Amino acid sequence: MITKQISIFIENRHGRLAEVTDIIAKNGINIRALSVADTTSFGILRLIVDDPERLEGILRENRITASITSVLTVCIGDKPGALVDLLRKLEDIQIEYMYTYISADGGDACIILRVDRDEEAVHRLTAAGFRGPDKI
Amino acid sequence: MNFFQRDIETMPRKELEALQLARLRHLVDYVDRNVPFYHKRLAEAGVTADKIKTLSDIQYIPYTTKADIRDTYPFGLFAVDRKKIVRIHASSGTTGKPTVVGYTKQDLDTWSECVARLTMAAGASEDDIVQICFGYGLFTGALGLHYGLEKIGATVVPSSSGNTEKQIMLMKDFGTTALVSTPSYAYYISEVARDIGVDPRTLNVRLGLFGSEGCTPEMRQKIEEAWNLFATDNYGMSELMGPGVSGECRERCGMHFAEDHFLPEIINPETGEVLPRGEQGELVVTTLTKEGIPLLRYRTKDITRIHYDTCACGRTHARMDKPTGRSDDMLKIKGVNVFPSQIESVLIAIPQVGANYQIVLGTKNYMDTFEINIEVTDAALLDHYGELEKLQKLVHHKLQTVLGLDAKINLVQPRSLERFQGKARRVVDNRVK
Ligand SMILES: [Zn+2]
């Protein structure tokens, strides 16, 4: 249920996002999920990839500021209301999340969450019947 | 305490000033006879050598400016036959022709002697392996330090600037103990070292001999922490000789002039009047012993202050503060006078800001625009989006409170700012003049 996520600083300059994704593609790294948050002047690109450690090294060589953090990936299936169930559960167990985004890789929809106490969250969500994807 | 020439460096001031006076009188006579430009200038001012009775009589001699050297390009101010000149250096002009200087054999000896003094005062010795990361060539920095360091018996590695990864390899393999470079290049090397997995603190480099651009105390501290070294500054300019005009001792309470060769004064840059001792103003220097291109009262444009009390190190030669800026560099932004160094002091005090920033000035609707580009180097900022915005606001707020200036803060990719391996280009002024 815990996955490594890469966060990348993206300067708001024409073509910058393309430059970064091009570096990733050229190195044969697969993007499983992606979110971009931006303002008018800069953005943060968050990625789930198949080889985060290798990507971090490649980014460092290319002088791109990036950090690795742990995030939760939880399957929410295809049924209506599943996301609401998950968020309610987090509220119940008093786990705060900072951001979420969706990965629909391979059919089973997953939600990616950055939470404050991942170990505890995994433990309690598993107990409540939630599960992570088989592979990411 | 290490001295290269203890007798001269600790000479009682009375004796030193008597020596300066004798040399000044000789110099006035020398340029009067050998440089047509000065012959004319001195005649117009009614000054002859025998009219110089005390050191303060120097005030009757007209100033020499960079424009005077340029106007007589290339060899117009040389005082000796070209055959006696054994070396030429030049500083790049931002516009038009460079400023050309020539050295006799004697000048080169004096030069290496002055540099030998300052490097020993900074703590260098024959035990050191010194890597010179200044670009060799017409620029005086590299060769100036080179011959001075050889003179004290240090092992000199003339690695020049550029090819930073190779520089780091040499440092590691040779066990380099001292580094000669600009402060910004020293910091840049430490960043590259980290990128390639070398902790600069584990290298042997224990002494920095920095020069050729200004360095704020905050920047110095960052460099010292990055390298675990003792940083010293030295000062000079090619018109006067090159490095060796003044340099810091281990006390680091100002840079000691080589006062038997250079006579410093402080003037009001606007009115040209000589200021009383201890006041801040533009540094003016007379080269007392140069043969090739001696200069009377050369206006350096550097803003500083001079201290005349004897230093704790025992040296009696006067000390100058690090220049706070150049009278040329002072920026007038939205009507406020600021030196780029003041902006740097604000930025470096903010831990998440890289030492690398750029000031960009422009014009919009007939008004000045003031923007600062800051490299985001701290990956920890990426966890919460709000952290980046908080940083932007913090920088804006600090500049507002300290300098009273409203800046637009841009966060940019690390190493995306224009960077020279010599001097960092901190200010880009695109304003419509
Ligand atoms: Zn001293």
Image (cartoon, grey):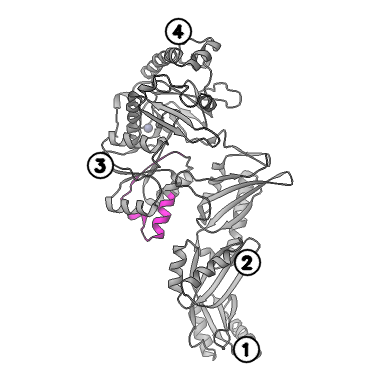
From mark 2 to mark 4, how far is it between C-alphas?
74 Å
For numbered disc 3, what is the local secondary structure? loop
Instruction: Inspect this view and state whether residue B207 appears.
Output: yes
For numbered disc 4, what is the local secondary structure? helix
For numbered disc 1, what is the local secondary structure? helix
Q: Which residue is mark 3?
A: B127
- Does residue B375 appear left or right of residue B408 in this picture? left
Q: Quadrant of residue B330?
A: top right
- Indicate which label's residue lies in the foreground, 2 or 1: 2
Asked if marks 2 and 3 touch (Cβ < 8 Å), the reply is: no
In this view, the residue farthest toward the right is B365
Q: Residue at x 39, y 19 (%)?
A: B81
In this view, the residue farthest toward the front is B83
Instruction: Inspect this view and state whether residue B317 appears.
Output: no
From mark 2 to mark 3, how far is it between C-alphas?
54 Å
- Does residue B196 appear left or right of residue A66 in this picture? left
Q: Chain of mark 2?
A: A
Q: Which residue is mark 2?
A: A38
Q: Chain of mark 4?
A: B
Could you confirm whether marks 3 and 4 are on the same chain?
Answer: yes
- Name the amino acid type tagged 4: Asp
- Front in this rendered view, residue B247 or A47: A47
Q: Which residue is mark 1?
A: A82
Q: Residue at x 28, y 36 (%)?
A: B150
Q: Residue at x 47, y 28 (%)?
A: B306
Number of marks in the image?
4
- Residue B163 appears at what percent x and percent y? 39, 51
Dot 1, crowdedness within 10 Å: few (<14), some or many (≥20)? few
